[in-house]
Amino acid sequence: MTLCHEINNMDSYKDNKIRKFEDLVCWQKGRELVSAIYKVTNRWSDRSFQDQIRRASVSVVSNIAEGFERGSKDELLYFMYIARGSVGEVRSQLHIARDLGLISEPEFLKLYDLADFTARLIYKFIESYKSKSYGGQKYGDMKAVEQKEFDDYLQNIINKKVTR
């Protein structure tokens, strides 16, 4: 099954109950990405670059897990945005690896496709989760913040983190 086929069949995941972060398809694909990155980077002599792309890939699954375990809608979405940013970092580093001859074109295409698919899954999760009125595990009976207010809230958090 191709990744494009999987993304078109995302409706099949809607009926599954999400009880832990390991149930999230975006976490599962992120985990596949980590394994694939580790395998291809084993032969690299540039340990600094190897470490950078590995850390970025691990950051994807780590942030999804941390956000999920925090128990609130706001924190989950905040960490999902960070995870998506880490996937972008991996994709950028894949371009560099290809440019430097560290990976072949077929390796690049395979890894890039997996990273892009993971980013799309995270985006789809964020958008569907933002539209729900559920306040998260921690605040299950609270009303969700209006879309604009929520986006402003997240931007505030991001700005505070950047200025520190």
Image: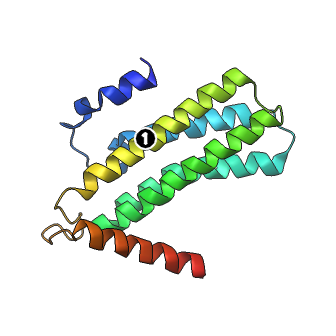
Left or right: 13 in relation to 43: left
Left or right: 49 in relation to 26: right
Q: Residue at x 55, y 30 (%)?
A: 113
Q: Is residue 16 visible?
A: yes
From the top left corner, tell me how far across and down residue 128 is, in percent: 26, 49
Q: Residue at x 41, y 64 (%)?
A: 78
- 47 above or below 108? below
Left or right: 9 in relation to 54: left
Q: Quadrant of the C terminus?
A: bottom right
From the top left corner, tell me how far across and down residue 142 is, in percent: 15, 72
Amino acid type of the residue that numbered disc 1 sits on in the rendered structure: Arg
How packed mark 1 is, by other alpha carbons closer than 10 Å (few <14, some 14-19, many 20 or more), is some
Q: Residue at x 54, y 38 (%)?
A: 115
From the top left corner, tell me how far across and down residue 12 is, in percent: 23, 29
Comparing 57 with 87, the one in front is: 87
Q: Quadrant of the N terminus?
A: top left
Say how the picture is coloured: rainbow
Q: Is residue 62 visible?
A: no
- 100 above or below 158? above
Numbered disc 1: secondary structure: helix
- 148 above or below 11? below
Residue annotated with mark 1: 120
Comparing 118 with 48, the one in front is: 118
Q: For residue 15, which quarter of the picture?
A: top left
Left or right: 132 in relation to 26: left
Q: For residue 152, which quarter of the picture?
A: bottom left
